[in-house]
Image (tube, rainbow, N blue to C red):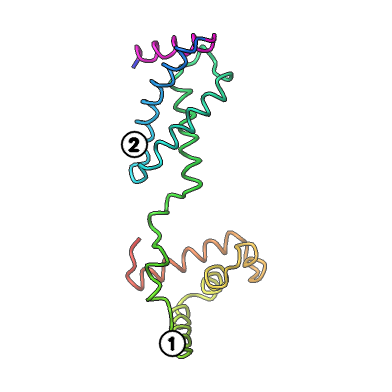
Amino acid sequence: MHTVESQLHALWMQSLQGDRACYERVLTLLSTYVRGFLRKRLQSQLSDVEDLVQETLMAIHQKRHTYQSDQPLTAWVFAIARYKWVDHLRVHGRREKLHDDIDDWADTLTVDSDTETSDAQRDLAQVLADLPPKQRAAIEHTRLQGLSITETAQLTGQSEASVKVNVHRGLKTLMAKWGVQK
């Protein structure tokens, strides 16, 4: 890796002096390394790798003036790639693959009559009745009514942290009771 670093550093320094051929060559070489770096981290989202490679190369171009010549070029490049990867995770979420598409459940979730609706509400009330009152209230407000953590905290008199903990513990209890695995 030391010889690769030396080669890339030399090309980069020449490109910063205005050598277009060196700039094109160093970006081509860096894209190969960045692509490998991102492939390892986005195994389940390989379709996004090329977009992130391009975003990383654009960021390298835009931030080239911040490179400090006494520092390893690859460390600087991989730091930029890592930031782009983390930004991608924030936008797309790590748990995206855990969520089912609601359209897949449309037939199961629809009700044909008021009787079925009231039956479902009764069943849900029975399931939630087994929870401690604070957990039940936190789940009802945040998950069923769609209130925010802050709104639920104000409404129930709990702290925001308590609401989060109660939702988590309540859902964990329900999943354990009903045999749902993550």
Residue 49 vertical placement versus 31 (above, below): below
Q: From the image, which quarter does the N terminus lie in?
A: top left
Confirm whether the magenta stretch covers residue 182: no
- The structure residue drawn at horizontal position 38% and vertical position 35%, both measured from the top left corner, is 38
Dot 1: what SS? Answer: helix
Please state which amino acid type lies under the numbered disc 1. Answer: Glu
Q: Which mark is residue 90?
A: none
Label 2: which secondary element: helix
The dominant secondary structure in magenta is helix
**Would you call the spot at circle 2 few (<14 residues within 10 Å), some (14-19), or many (20 or more)?**
few
Name the spot of residue 37 as percent of width and height, x first.
Answer: 37, 31
- Mark 2 residue type: Lys
Q: Which residue is identified by label 2?
A: 40
Q: Which residue is mark 1?
A: 116
Residue 71, given in percent of the width and then of the height, sits at: 49, 15
Q: Is residue 100 above or below residue 141?
A: above
Residue found 48% across the figure and 23% down from its top: 76
